[in-house]
Amino acid sequence: MEQPPGFVAQGESSLLCKLRRSLYGLKQSPRAWFKKFSHVVQNFGLKRSEVDHLVFYCHTSPGRCVYLIVYVDDIVITGNDATTISQLKKHLFSHFQTKDLGHLKYFLGIKVAQSKEGIVISQRKYAIDILKETGMLDCKPIDSPMDPNQKLMADQGEPFTDPERYRRLVGKLIYLTITRPDLSFAIGIVSQFM
């Protein structure tokens, strides 16, 4: 690594620094952190999923399991083995500076509400933010997002002035289908015009 500004000794500007560990802000830092995290979690006994490398799991006994999901620097731990979950948290606390935020309430823009009846996920705030961004917050709600018999054409209507904004909005709508699969047909149609 090149010497930082102000660190260079007179006549030794060609020397380099050897890093003993990853430095925040370098492009290889996230990979180094995840490699270390993965090693710590696997040493605890969790296996890395072959399908999604950000998911770790273990089956502690018949019918008992623990799952750990990583997204950048957010970690979700879930399962039906409270003892193993508690031990896993202690293991993570001993290796990383982290904090337990309790039961999952919000993750990646999705609100999670847990009760005895089950789990409800919602993107209400996310949907309202999209409506605000498009100036449609006060529009009248309808039963169906789009008439399935309506045919849209690329040359009909006034062209969208900002194609990048259109693509961004369609991407947000696609993300909204996580909790609103009923929007998939309409969003599939509008995504054809990106």
Image: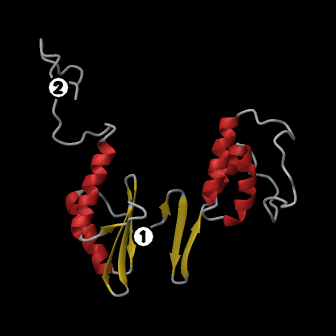
Mark positioned earlier in the residue sequence (1 or 2): 2
Residue 80 locus on image (x, y percent): 38, 81
Amino acid type assigned to the residue bearing label 2 in the image:
Leu
Identify the image quadrant of residue 19.
Answer: top left
Residue 161 position within the rendered picture, expressed as x and y whole percent measured from the top left: 75, 32
Is disc 1 placed on a helix, strand or loop? loop
Rendering quarter of residue 164: top right
Picture quarter containing residue 62? Answer: bottom left
Task: Residue lying at the far front in this picture: please name it.
Answer: 50
Q: Nearer the viewer, residue 63 or 143?
A: 63
From this view, report whether residue 170 is shown above or below residue 116: above
Any part of residue 97 in sight: no
Question: Could you tell me which secondary element the residue under label 2 belongs to?
Answer: loop
**Is residue 77 visible in the rendered structure shown here?**
yes
Locate residue 142 relative to residue 35 in the image: left or right. right
Q: CA distance from mark 1 to mark 2?
A: 46 Å
Q: Residues within 10 Å of mark 1 (few under 14, many from 20)?
A: few
Nearer the viewer's eye, disc 1 or disc 2? Answer: 2
79 with respect to 136 (left or right) = left
Give percent across and percent down for residue 113. 53, 71
Quarter of the N terminus within the rendering? top left
Q: Is residue 173 left or right of residue 17?
A: right
**Quick one: 131 or 1, which is closer to the camera?**
1
Residue under the point 85% across and 60% down: 147
Return the x and y of residue 91 as percentages of the image width and height.
22, 66
* Residue at the spot 75% in from the left edge and 57% down from the top edge: 186
Question: Please, is residue 40 above or below residue 23 in the view?
Answer: below
Identify the residue position indicated by label 1 in the image: 103
Please give the label number shown on residue 16: 2
> Residue at 34% of width from left, 38% of height from top?
27
